[in-house]
Amino acid sequence: MTGAGAKAAEYRIEDLAHASGATVRTIRAYQDRGLLPTPERRGRANVYRETHLARLRQIADLLDRGYTLASIKELLEAWDAGRGLGGVLGLVAEVHGPWTDEEAGRISRRELDARFGGRRDDEAIAEAVELGVLERVPGRDDEFLVPSPQELTVAVELYGAGVPLSAISGHLRELRGQVEHIASRFLEFTTEHVFARYLGHRPPTDSDAAEAASLVRRLRPLAQQTVDAELARAMWTFATRHLHHHLGEERSAIAENSTRPVLLPARTTQAVQNLVGAEGLADFVAAATERELQARTLDHLMASHAKENKIDEHP
Protein backbone atom coordinates (compact mmCIF):
# COMPACT_ATOMS: atom_id res chain seq x y z
CA MET A 1 0.00 0.00 0.00
CA THR A 2 1.29 3.48 -0.85
CA GLY A 3 0.25 7.07 -0.14
CA ALA A 4 0.66 9.53 2.74
CA GLY A 5 -1.15 12.43 4.36
CA ALA A 6 -4.40 13.35 2.62
CA LYS A 7 -3.66 11.16 -0.38
CA ALA A 8 -6.15 8.30 -0.79
CA ALA A 9 -4.85 4.84 -0.01
CA GLU A 10 -3.82 2.73 -2.97
CA TYR A 11 -3.46 -1.05 -3.11
CA ARG A 12 -1.80 -3.52 -5.36
CA ILE A 13 -3.91 -6.63 -5.76
CA GLU A 14 -1.79 -8.57 -3.26
CA ASP A 15 -2.18 -5.77 -0.68
CA LEU A 16 -5.93 -5.63 -1.30
CA ALA A 17 -6.17 -9.39 -0.77
CA HIS A 18 -4.32 -9.12 2.53
CA ALA A 19 -6.46 -6.19 3.76
CA SER A 20 -9.79 -7.75 2.77
CA GLY A 21 -9.16 -11.39 3.63
CA ALA A 22 -10.02 -12.47 0.10
CA THR A 23 -7.60 -14.29 -2.16
CA VAL A 24 -6.09 -12.74 -5.30
CA ARG A 25 -7.95 -15.32 -7.35
CA THR A 26 -11.27 -14.36 -5.69
CA ILE A 27 -10.69 -10.64 -6.34
CA ARG A 28 -10.03 -11.33 -10.01
CA ALA A 29 -13.16 -13.51 -10.22
CA TYR A 30 -15.28 -10.74 -8.66
CA GLN A 31 -13.78 -8.28 -11.12
CA ASP A 32 -14.65 -10.56 -14.06
CA ARG A 33 -18.25 -10.83 -12.78
CA GLY A 34 -18.59 -7.07 -12.54
CA LEU A 35 -18.85 -7.05 -8.76
CA LEU A 36 -15.87 -4.72 -8.37
CA PRO A 37 -15.29 -1.34 -10.04
CA THR A 38 -12.62 -1.37 -12.70
CA PRO A 39 -9.25 -0.60 -11.11
CA GLU A 40 -6.94 2.11 -12.39
CA ARG A 41 -4.31 0.85 -14.77
CA ARG A 42 -0.85 2.14 -13.93
CA GLY A 43 1.89 0.73 -16.11
CA ARG A 44 1.60 -3.02 -16.03
CA ALA A 45 -0.22 -3.16 -12.69
CA ASN A 46 -3.77 -2.48 -11.50
CA VAL A 47 -4.22 -0.01 -8.65
CA TYR A 48 -7.13 -0.44 -6.22
CA ARG A 49 -8.53 2.06 -3.72
CA GLU A 50 -10.60 2.15 -0.53
CA THR A 51 -13.79 1.81 -2.57
CA HIS A 52 -12.60 -1.61 -3.72
CA LEU A 53 -11.82 -2.67 -0.14
CA ALA A 54 -15.24 -1.47 1.06
CA ARG A 55 -16.93 -3.35 -1.78
CA LEU A 56 -15.10 -6.58 -0.93
CA ARG A 57 -16.26 -6.27 2.69
CA GLN A 58 -19.83 -5.71 1.53
CA ILE A 59 -19.67 -8.82 -0.63
CA ALA A 60 -18.27 -10.90 2.23
CA ASP A 61 -21.04 -9.68 4.56
CA LEU A 62 -23.78 -10.50 2.06
CA LEU A 63 -22.31 -13.94 1.39
CA ASP A 64 -22.38 -14.62 5.15
CA ARG A 65 -26.06 -13.66 5.14
CA GLY A 66 -26.80 -16.34 2.53
CA TYR A 67 -26.93 -14.27 -0.66
CA THR A 68 -25.67 -15.71 -3.95
CA LEU A 69 -23.20 -13.81 -6.10
CA ALA A 70 -25.94 -13.19 -8.67
CA SER A 71 -28.24 -11.57 -6.12
CA ILE A 72 -25.32 -9.63 -4.63
CA LYS A 73 -24.61 -8.19 -8.07
CA GLU A 74 -28.21 -6.97 -8.30
CA LEU A 75 -27.99 -5.35 -4.88
CA LEU A 76 -24.70 -3.64 -5.68
CA GLU A 77 -26.04 -2.38 -8.99
CA ALA A 78 -28.96 -0.87 -7.09
CA TRP A 79 -26.50 0.78 -4.73
CA ASP A 80 -24.49 2.17 -7.64
CA ALA A 81 -27.72 3.45 -9.23
CA GLY A 82 -28.42 5.48 -6.11
CA ARG A 83 -31.32 3.39 -4.79
CA GLY A 84 -29.46 2.60 -1.58
CA LEU A 85 -28.92 -0.58 0.39
CA GLY A 86 -30.07 0.65 3.79
CA GLY A 87 -33.58 -0.79 3.62
CA VAL A 88 -32.48 -4.00 1.96
CA LEU A 89 -29.75 -4.66 4.51
CA GLY A 90 -32.24 -3.84 7.26
CA LEU A 91 -34.60 -6.47 5.86
CA VAL A 92 -31.75 -8.96 5.60
CA ALA A 93 -30.74 -8.27 9.20
CA GLU A 94 -34.34 -8.72 10.36
CA VAL A 95 -34.74 -12.07 8.63
CA HIS A 96 -31.32 -13.33 9.70
CA GLY A 97 -31.74 -12.15 13.27
CA PRO A 98 -32.79 -14.49 16.10
CA TRP A 99 -36.35 -15.79 15.90
CA THR A 100 -36.53 -16.51 19.60
CA ASP A 101 -35.79 -14.66 22.82
CA GLU A 102 -34.01 -17.71 24.20
CA GLU A 103 -30.31 -17.21 24.84
CA ALA A 104 -27.74 -19.89 24.06
CA GLY A 105 -25.76 -21.38 26.93
CA ARG A 106 -22.74 -23.52 27.67
CA ILE A 107 -22.39 -26.81 29.48
CA SER A 108 -19.39 -28.87 30.53
CA ARG A 109 -19.06 -32.53 29.63
CA ARG A 110 -19.12 -33.45 33.31
CA GLU A 111 -22.37 -31.55 33.91
CA LEU A 112 -23.86 -33.01 30.74
CA ASP A 113 -23.05 -36.57 31.83
CA ALA A 114 -24.49 -35.87 35.29
CA ARG A 115 -27.79 -34.61 33.85
CA PHE A 116 -28.17 -37.85 31.88
CA GLY A 117 -27.64 -40.33 34.68
CA GLY A 118 -23.90 -39.96 35.16
CA ARG A 119 -23.04 -42.38 32.36
CA ARG A 120 -20.60 -41.30 29.64
CA ASP A 121 -22.20 -41.85 26.25
CA ASP A 122 -20.02 -40.65 23.38
CA GLU A 123 -22.44 -41.97 20.76
CA ALA A 124 -25.31 -39.92 22.21
CA ILE A 125 -23.08 -36.83 22.32
CA ALA A 126 -22.14 -37.27 18.67
CA GLU A 127 -25.81 -37.59 17.70
CA ALA A 128 -26.71 -34.48 19.72
CA VAL A 129 -23.98 -32.56 17.89
CA GLU A 130 -25.25 -33.84 14.53
CA LEU A 131 -28.76 -32.67 15.42
CA GLY A 132 -27.47 -29.26 16.56
CA VAL A 133 -28.68 -29.73 20.14
CA LEU A 134 -25.02 -29.32 21.13
CA GLU A 135 -22.18 -27.53 19.36
CA ARG A 136 -18.51 -28.23 19.99
CA VAL A 137 -16.34 -25.41 21.27
CA PRO A 138 -13.14 -25.19 19.19
CA GLY A 139 -10.17 -26.32 21.24
CA ARG A 140 -12.35 -27.52 24.13
CA ASP A 141 -13.29 -31.19 24.27
CA ASP A 142 -14.90 -30.81 27.70
CA GLU A 143 -17.36 -28.01 26.89
CA PHE A 144 -20.29 -27.51 24.53
CA LEU A 145 -22.44 -24.66 23.31
CA VAL A 146 -26.19 -25.20 23.82
CA PRO A 147 -28.15 -23.23 21.17
CA SER A 148 -31.47 -24.00 22.94
CA PRO A 149 -31.24 -24.75 26.68
CA GLN A 150 -35.00 -25.41 26.66
CA GLU A 151 -34.59 -28.20 24.12
CA LEU A 152 -31.83 -29.77 26.19
CA THR A 153 -34.01 -29.53 29.32
CA VAL A 154 -36.81 -31.37 27.53
CA ALA A 155 -34.39 -34.17 26.64
CA VAL A 156 -33.21 -34.37 30.26
CA GLU A 157 -36.80 -34.59 31.56
CA LEU A 158 -37.77 -37.26 29.02
CA TYR A 159 -34.67 -39.29 29.88
CA GLY A 160 -35.45 -38.97 33.57
CA ALA A 161 -38.97 -40.26 32.87
CA GLY A 162 -37.51 -43.40 31.30
CA VAL A 163 -37.29 -42.56 27.60
CA PRO A 164 -34.06 -43.93 26.02
CA LEU A 165 -31.73 -41.40 24.40
CA SER A 166 -32.02 -43.15 21.04
CA ALA A 167 -35.81 -42.73 21.16
CA ILE A 168 -35.47 -39.07 22.12
CA SER A 169 -33.16 -38.31 19.19
CA GLY A 170 -35.37 -40.27 16.80
CA HIS A 171 -38.42 -38.35 17.98
CA LEU A 172 -36.56 -35.06 17.53
CA ARG A 173 -35.66 -35.94 13.95
CA GLU A 174 -39.28 -36.76 13.16
CA LEU A 175 -40.58 -33.65 14.93
CA ARG A 176 -38.05 -31.42 13.19
CA GLY A 177 -39.20 -32.59 9.78
CA GLN A 178 -42.83 -31.87 10.65
CA VAL A 179 -42.03 -28.44 12.11
CA GLU A 180 -39.94 -27.51 9.08
CA HIS A 181 -42.95 -28.34 6.91
CA ILE A 182 -45.13 -26.05 9.06
CA ALA A 183 -42.54 -23.26 8.80
CA SER A 184 -42.34 -23.66 5.03
CA ARG A 185 -46.12 -23.50 4.67
CA PHE A 186 -46.36 -20.42 6.90
CA LEU A 187 -43.67 -18.71 4.84
CA GLU A 188 -45.47 -19.55 1.59
CA PHE A 189 -48.74 -18.27 3.07
CA THR A 190 -47.33 -14.94 4.24
CA THR A 191 -45.35 -14.49 1.05
CA GLU A 192 -48.46 -14.97 -1.07
CA HIS A 193 -50.73 -12.71 0.95
CA VAL A 194 -48.34 -10.17 2.53
CA PHE A 195 -44.90 -9.97 0.96
CA ALA A 196 -45.71 -10.58 -2.71
CA ARG A 197 -46.22 -6.86 -3.28
CA TYR A 198 -42.65 -6.15 -2.20
CA LEU A 199 -41.14 -8.67 -4.61
CA GLY A 200 -42.00 -6.85 -7.84
CA HIS A 201 -38.69 -4.99 -7.81
CA ARG A 202 -35.42 -6.90 -7.88
CA PRO A 203 -33.99 -5.74 -5.63
CA PRO A 204 -36.87 -4.00 -3.80
CA THR A 205 -36.75 -0.25 -3.34
CA ASP A 206 -35.27 1.08 -0.15
CA SER A 207 -38.66 2.12 1.24
CA ASP A 208 -40.32 -1.19 0.30
CA ALA A 209 -37.53 -3.14 1.97
CA ALA A 210 -37.83 -1.05 5.13
CA GLU A 211 -41.60 -1.60 5.24
CA ALA A 212 -41.14 -5.34 4.66
CA ALA A 213 -38.63 -5.47 7.53
CA SER A 214 -41.19 -3.84 9.81
CA LEU A 215 -43.77 -6.46 8.80
CA VAL A 216 -41.29 -9.26 9.53
CA ARG A 217 -40.93 -7.91 13.08
CA ARG A 218 -44.72 -7.84 13.50
CA LEU A 219 -45.43 -11.23 11.94
CA ARG A 220 -42.45 -13.11 13.35
CA PRO A 221 -44.15 -14.26 16.59
CA LEU A 222 -47.40 -15.24 14.87
CA ALA A 223 -46.16 -18.58 13.58
CA GLN A 224 -45.03 -19.70 17.03
CA GLN A 225 -48.20 -18.41 18.70
CA THR A 226 -50.35 -20.29 16.20
CA VAL A 227 -48.38 -23.50 16.61
CA ASP A 228 -48.49 -23.19 20.42
CA ALA A 229 -52.28 -22.77 20.39
CA GLU A 230 -52.88 -25.61 17.94
CA LEU A 231 -50.45 -27.91 19.74
CA ALA A 232 -52.25 -27.28 23.05
CA ARG A 233 -55.59 -28.05 21.39
CA ALA A 234 -54.29 -31.21 19.74
CA MET A 235 -52.57 -32.43 22.91
CA TRP A 236 -55.81 -31.99 24.89
CA THR A 237 -57.80 -33.85 22.26
CA PHE A 238 -55.44 -36.78 21.86
CA ALA A 239 -54.41 -37.04 25.52
CA THR A 240 -58.08 -37.25 26.51
CA ARG A 241 -58.74 -39.83 23.85
CA HIS A 242 -55.73 -41.90 24.94
CA LEU A 243 -56.80 -41.71 28.57
CA HIS A 244 -60.29 -42.98 27.78
CA HIS A 245 -58.92 -45.69 25.53
CA HIS A 246 -56.40 -47.03 28.04
CA LEU A 247 -58.77 -46.80 30.99
CA GLY A 248 -61.31 -48.70 28.95
CA GLU A 249 -58.73 -51.35 28.05
CA GLU A 250 -57.72 -51.69 31.69
CA ARG A 251 -61.34 -52.18 32.67
CA SER A 252 -61.82 -54.79 29.95
CA ALA A 253 -58.76 -56.68 31.18
CA ILE A 254 -60.19 -57.21 34.68
CA ALA A 255 -63.85 -57.65 33.76
CA GLU A 256 -65.69 -60.21 31.69
CA ASN A 257 -64.99 -60.55 28.01
CA SER A 258 -68.32 -58.96 27.15
CA THR A 259 -67.34 -55.54 28.54
CA ARG A 260 -66.01 -52.79 26.25
CA PRO A 261 -64.65 -49.25 26.67
CA VAL A 262 -67.01 -46.28 26.63
CA LEU A 263 -65.88 -42.69 25.90
CA LEU A 264 -66.95 -39.98 28.34
CA PRO A 265 -66.80 -36.16 28.03
CA ALA A 266 -63.44 -34.83 29.16
CA ARG A 267 -64.96 -32.54 31.79
CA THR A 268 -66.81 -35.50 33.34
CA THR A 269 -63.65 -37.59 33.45
CA GLN A 270 -61.70 -34.71 35.00
CA ALA A 271 -64.38 -34.03 37.63
CA VAL A 272 -64.42 -37.69 38.70
CA GLN A 273 -60.63 -37.84 38.76
CA ASN A 274 -60.53 -34.76 40.99
CA LEU A 275 -62.82 -36.59 43.46
CA VAL A 276 -61.29 -40.05 43.57
CA GLY A 277 -57.88 -39.74 41.87
CA ALA A 278 -56.68 -41.26 38.62
CA GLU A 279 -56.26 -44.72 40.14
CA GLY A 280 -59.91 -44.86 41.23
CA LEU A 281 -61.43 -43.33 38.12
CA ALA A 282 -62.35 -46.56 36.32
CA ASP A 283 -63.80 -48.23 39.45
CA PHE A 284 -65.84 -45.15 40.31
CA VAL A 285 -67.33 -44.92 36.81
CA ALA A 286 -68.12 -48.63 36.84
CA ALA A 287 -69.73 -48.46 40.31
CA ALA A 288 -71.75 -45.37 39.40
CA THR A 289 -72.95 -47.09 36.24
CA GLU A 290 -73.97 -50.20 38.14
CA ARG A 291 -75.78 -48.09 40.75
CA GLU A 292 -77.66 -46.14 38.07
CA LEU A 293 -78.54 -49.35 36.28
CA GLN A 294 -79.88 -50.91 39.50
CA ALA A 295 -81.87 -47.76 40.32
CA ARG A 296 -83.43 -47.65 36.89
CA THR A 297 -84.18 -51.38 37.04
CA LEU A 298 -85.85 -50.96 40.43
CA ASP A 299 -87.83 -47.96 39.17
CA HIS A 300 -88.97 -50.01 36.21
CA LEU A 301 -90.02 -52.91 38.43
CA MET A 302 -91.89 -50.59 40.79
CA ALA A 303 -93.64 -48.89 37.92
CA SER A 304 -94.60 -52.26 36.45
CA HIS A 305 -95.83 -53.51 39.84
CA ALA A 306 -97.92 -50.37 40.39
CA LYS A 307 -99.43 -50.73 36.94
CA GLU A 308 -100.32 -54.38 37.60
CA ASN A 309 -101.94 -53.51 40.93
CA LYS A 310 -103.95 -50.74 39.29
CA ILE A 311 -105.19 -53.20 36.68
CA ASP A 312 -106.12 -55.75 39.36
CA GLU A 313 -108.18 -53.10 41.18
CA HIS A 314 -110.59 -52.84 38.22
CA PRO A 315 -113.61 -55.21 38.45
Image (spheres, grey):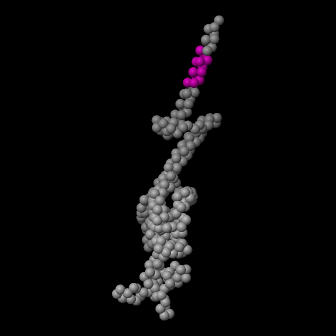
Residue at 59 percent across and 41 percent down: it is 249
Which quarter of the image is occupied by the C terminus?
Answer: top right
Relative to 145, 186 lies left or right? right
Residue at position x 36%, y 88% from top?
Answer: 4
Residue 122 in percent (x, y) is at 50, 65
Task: Give coordinates of residue 266: x percent, y percent.
Answer: 52, 39
Q: Residue at x 42, y 87 (%)?
A: 10
* Vertical position of residue 78 compared to residue 169: above or below: below
Residues 233 and 255: in front is: 233
Relative horizontal placement of residue 131, taking residue 258 as reference (left or right): left
Q: Residue at x 35, y 86 (%)?
A: 6
Is residue 146 a member of the stretch shown in magenta? no
Relative depth, front residue between 291 and 36: 36
Residue 148 pos. (x, y %)? 46, 61
Give the number of callouts: 0
Q: Quadrant of residue 244?
A: top right
Q: Residue furthest toward the bottom?
A: 43
Query: As drawn, which residue projects farthest toward the top?
Result: 315
Q: Which residues are magenta?
A: 295-306
Instruction: Please determine whether, in this image, residue 75 is positioned above or below residue 2.
Output: above
Majority secondary structure in the magenta region: helix
Q: Does the magenta portion include 299? A: yes
State the residue in front, 181 or 144.
Answer: 181
Query: From where the camera sits, is residue 255 visible?
Result: yes
- Where is the N terminus found, in terms of image quarters? bottom left
Judge whether 122 appears above or below 80 on screen. Answer: above
Q: In which image quadrant can residue 295 be found?
A: top right
Residue placed furthest toward the left: 5
Residue 50: image location, x then y, percent: 42, 82
Residue 179 visible in the displayed image: no
